[in-house]
Each structure stands twice: as C-alpha cells, then as structure tokens.
Image (cartoon, rainbow, N blue to C red):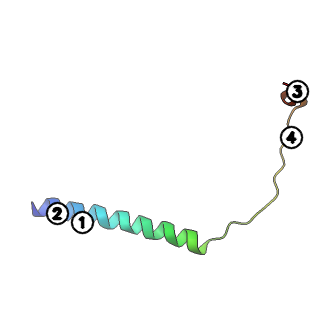
Amino acid sequence: MPSLLRLVFLIGLLCGLVFVATAALVAFVEPQPREMSQTIKPDLLNK
C-alpha cells in the first residue's frame, strides 16, 4: 500500500508541475502577430 501511495503522489506531483509550466507559459509568453496570406484558386471560390 505505501508504494501505491508513493506512485499516486508522484503522478500527482508530475501533473502539478505540468499545470504550473503551462500556466507560466500562458502568463509570460506573448505570441508575435504576423501577416499571413494564402493564394486560393478561383475554381474553389466558384463552387
């Protein structure tokens, strides 16, 4: 039973670290906006 609790604790700790890392990326990283252009064939527009 103690090894099962250790495993559950380790998995919870890893999930917590992933959550904190994701929250840090959202808080501190700003995406750089840039223009995009893509050519569309006229055949696709006339359907």
Which comes before the other along the chain, label 3 or label 4?
A: 4
Q: Is residue 33 left or right of residue 45?
A: left
Label 4: how many Cα within 10 Å (few below 14, some 14–19, many 20+): few
**For the residues bearing labels 2 and 4, Cβ distance under 8 angstroms:** no
Q: Which mark is residue 5?
A: 2
Q: Which mark is residue 39?
A: 4
**For the residues bearing labels 3 and 2, Cβ distance under 8 angstroms:** no
Label 3: how many Cα within 10 Å (few below 14, some 14–19, many 20+): few
Which comes before the other along the chain, label 1 or label 4?
A: 1
Residue 27 at x, y = what percent?
Answer: 57, 73
Residue at horizontal 37 percent and vertical 67 percent from the top: 16
Residue 45 at x, y = what percent?
Answer: 86, 31
Q: Is residue 45 left or right of residue 19?
A: right
Amino acid type, callout 2 = Leu
Residue at horizontal 73 percent and vertical 66 percent from the top: 32
Residue at disc 4, secondary structure = loop
Amino acid type, callout 1 = Phe
Residue 28 at x, y = what percent?
Answer: 59, 75
**For the residues bearing labels 3 and 4, Cβ distance under 8 angstroms:** no
Residue beneath label 3, please?
Answer: 46
**For the residues bearing labels 1 and 3, Cβ distance under 8 angstroms:** no
Residue beneath label 1, please?
Answer: 9
Residue at disc 2, secondary structure = helix
Q: Is residue 5 left or right of residue 38?
A: left
Amino acid type, callout 4 = Thr
Amino acid type, callout 3 = Asn
